[in-house]
Amino acid sequence: MSPPLHNSPAQSPPPDARKSELAGASGAPLKDFFGQEFSKEERALLVRLAHDSIAFALQGRDIPLESPTLHLAEPRGAFTSLYLHGELRGCVGYVLPACSVYRAVAETARAAAFDDNRFPPVTEAEAPQLQVELSILSPPMPIRPEQVEIGRHGLLISWGGRRGLLLPQVPVEHEWDRVTFLEQTCRKAGLPLDAWQKGASVEAFTAEVFGEKSAGEKSAGEKSAGEKSAQHLPESERQSG
């Protein structure tokens, strides 16, 4: 596996025509990935890459990590969720855009299959049956709590060396309101539920989510998959879900 990614990533956002902007708490623009940035062909390529990365690892081979296009070479944070028979089988991601989206998908897919300590490593028999869901993240930006929109924003809350992350789909799947979403992100960080009101850093991001699970499937495993947390790790490290 590759070493943890370094902090202070270089950011090369795509053209503004692909996104709208939201005002963050600092006044800086918060890039919105709520729409579709990646084409049908790019989505299929990234999902295939996730499968290939797992297959190569099972064969003891290193997969090439050079991006085939300039767009897929742009830095992004990304989470890969794996499902087996509708249940979560692994989830690992990079919060920060420290490497290309192409490399991030390859590395997080492999890590989700073999390095998520909640599950045993994926076997050769299981690999062909896996379903992949990818969440490509915008860079997190400061946001005021009252600006958080359910179904649009994911949250990253940190304070005193602890942090928790939840993807945008989580409050929708659990039917949470805005306050509950903020409280549950604090809980993921191991912080008091009201830490977001007491000085904790609140950052938001958006995610483009796609993969092989149909939009109508909302199993217990899928709900669990949405609960991606930072689990108190420094920002330079890979995150498990």
Image (cartoon, grey):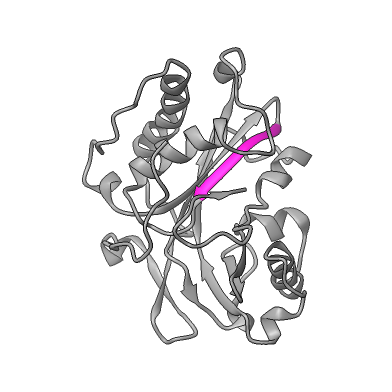
The residue drawn where x is 62% and y is 36% is 90
Picture quadrant where residue 124 is located: top right
Farthest residue to the top: give it. Answer: 125
Pick whichever, 17 or 108, lies toward us: 108
Membership of 94 in magenta stretch: no
Membership of 89 in magenta stretch: yes
Q: Which residues are magenta?
A: 87-93
The residue drawn where x is 61% and y is 67% is 163
Q: What main secondary structure does the magenta stretch of the protein show?
A: strand
For the N terminus, which image quadrant?
A: top left
Q: Position of residue 146 (x, y in %)?
A: 63, 83
Pick whichever, 223 or 115, lies toward us: 115
Q: Position of residue 98 (x, y in %)?
A: 35, 56
Does 178 sit above or below residue 124?
below
Q: Is residue 227 left or right of residue 109?
A: right
Q: Position of residue 2 (x, y in %)?
A: 38, 40
Number of marks in picture: 0
Q: Is residue 143 left or right of residue 199?
A: left
The residue drawn where x is 51% and y is 62% is 234
Picture quadrant where residue 112 is located: top right
Does 35 sit above or below residue 156?
above
Q: Is residue 207 left or right of residue 74?
A: right
Q: Position of residue 193 (x, y in %)?
A: 77, 74
Pick whichever, 44 or 164, lies toward us: 164
The residue drawn where x is 78% and y is 40% is 220
Residue 219 seen in the figure: no
Residue 104 seen in the figure: yes
